[in-house]
Image (tube, grey):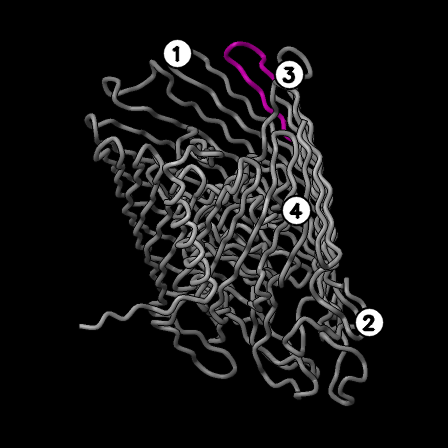
Amino acid sequence: MTLYLPRLPLSLAITSAISTAMLTSASAISAEPAESSIELDAVTVSADFRDTNVQELPEAVTVIGTNQIQSRSAQHLESVLSFAPNVNFSSGASRGRYFQIRGIGERSQFIDPVNPSVGLMIDGIDMTGLGGAATLMDVEQVEVLRGPQGTRFGANALAGMINIKSNDATKETEGYVAAKVGNYNTHSESAAISGSIADNVQGRLAINSFQSDGYMENEYLDKENTNNLDEVVVRGKLAVQLSENTNVGLTYFYADIDNGYDAFSLEKNRKTYSDDPGVDTQDTDAVSLFIDSKLSDVIQLEAEFTGSWTQAEYSYDDDWSYPGIALGWEYKAYDQYLRDSDRSSADIRILSGEKGRIFSGSSDWVVGVYLLQREEGLTRNYEYIPNQFESTLKTSSTAMYGEINTDLNDTLRLITGLRVENWISNYDDNSLVEGEVDEVLIGGKITLESMLNINHLAYVSLARGYKAGGTNTDPDISEKNREYETEFNNAVELGLKSSMFNDELTTRLSAFYIQRKNQQVKSSYSYLENGTPRFQDYLANAAEGKNYGLELESNLDITSNLNWSLSAGYLVTEFVDYTYENDDGIFNKNGRAQAHAPEYSFTSSIRYSLTPALSFGLEAESKDKFYYSDSHDEQSAAYALLHARIEYSRSNYSFALYGRNITNRDYAVKGYYFGIDPRLEYADEKQEQLGAPRLVGIEGRYNF
């Protein structure tokens, strides 16, 4: 019998070979006293109701820590998401700001309002749909919760939740200054200081400035910075101990994102012809107030109040070209979307204390109420619409939730959670399109966990998530496509979390099956308007979809000098009973995979300490091909990337040389299918936005 193994991408083979060599070297020195040690602290998840060790939380969660963020010299969330299995992102902007978990998530936004499937929290502030601000300055960790979060987060977390947690204020005075320079005229400067302001008050202030010319060259304008990055982020934190039992935390977050947007090329490379490049800007102020008070030994009160105010512009050269490129065929247009987003929320909950357990002391519990107000205004300027387009979406949500954790015996625990949410949204625009949604949504979970022994935790869970329906805004769309319905996800997950060999090896394995009911699907159609090629998006419902797969995460301290980690995902997605109609006819997508859902994703990394101060890291990430859209069948190419880092680190300073995508592999982060090239008389073809090329640089940091 012959066993056939799948061919691994070259970069993964290289990583495997180097790992083998290092293993051999490590074995040779393992009998000698260790010169250095790679120590990993216990990893705690903060996004749950109670802070919990990731190995003890009965759900699929990836925690991306400071070391992983630094290993890629990552500035933005998009650069580290591959550490989480079955997680993808879509760009179509200066940054990857649309996220997909287990094949579920939005991929773009133009005119229509969007209810995201993947939530984004930054220090407790809801930044869902505002992914441009997901920078990683002074961040402690990124938590990726996979699967419906129907109890904890509700309508914004149908597929999962991404929680970014920054460093807290400290009692002891500490801080750092850091800088880096790299190719493409990249440079970054950061600083942070933390310490006690008074006996019971601590503060932290951090600031980061990042600039880069970007990775595109505009040949028509003879410029190399039309797709530039220019980002400034400021974060301030206060921690106040009002009494022995009451703590207050205050966070202020400011992001000034002033990026260019000139990312698509008629030549399918990194050279553009735009005569009027666009921008991708976001100006955000956000605050949160968190109160944690032990009212008695029976109950504890937690309350969080947040507000955010964002102004954003997303614009681009609609024709991608310049006058004279194809006489008689070209057109000229500039498309601009100006958005204002104001949000406020209150989340108040009571948790059981040490003496507040119920059912004969077997059960912890939490009950809470959540209130949300959100208003989003859009102004669109475009040459081919007679008047400036304006729309307003007002959303309010009132939810009650609760969760009970019951110890059935010494090894079994039952977790039950429920959330009931009244979701109300009102849409209107100056095209006389109106829409209203007012519905009660119910989600939750039931989980049974078992401590098989001191090293192994197994669990099985059933979760239900939801995402509210809405209104398609195109005034010319058919009435049958005007409204789309709420989507519900029913998910079954089995998992096993293990810690072995004195925690030198940790693994997390999960298998899942998701039934998508009334799956919201972005459809689109293309057409010519006054000789100008146009395409129109709208949301529809497929009768059903299904997503299932496997996920594995592991971390192994091979020796005190050598660490190896792995993240691998296998994903199958499928439409069930989905057809749609446009001017070209009726299209049947039954059985086809869903968009932005690669069948496999894989990240492997090794870190080797050569001396107590000098370390070397190598990472490989790989992703299978995937469909760009649910409305056409164009796909990306599978790819593999290599990253490397050499670091010299002492207690108060460090220097590092880093390289990302060191083989300079071309890969796509966004794709469309339409005609845009006047030289081809606007024949339909695949259009792709390329991800970052080879990035190399040096960085230094001084700690005090």
Residue 576 percent coordinates (x, y): 33, 67
The residue lying toward the viewer, choosing from 548 and 473, is 548
Where 350 sits versus 502, above or below? above
Looking at the rendered structure, the kind of residue marked 2 is Leu
Image quarter for residue 107?
bottom right
Which of disc 1 and disc 2 is earlier in sequence? 2
The residue that mark 2 highlights is 221
Disc 3 crowd, CA 10 A, few/some/many (<14, 14-19, 20+):
some
344 to the left or right of 350: right
Taking the spot 45% from the left edge, 58% from the top edge, the residue there is: 15
Which of 658/685 is in front? 658
Residue at the disc numbered 4:
341
Q: Nearer the viewer, residue 280 or 331?
A: 280
Instruction: Determine the residue located farthest toward the left in the rendered image.
Output: 1
Q: CA distance from mark 4 to mark 3?
A: 32 Å
Q: Which mark is residue 394?
A: none
Report the disc number at residue 297: 1
SS type, badge 1: loop
Q: Main secondary structure of the magenta part?
A: strand
Q: Residues within 10 Å of mark 2 (few under 14, many from 20)?
A: some
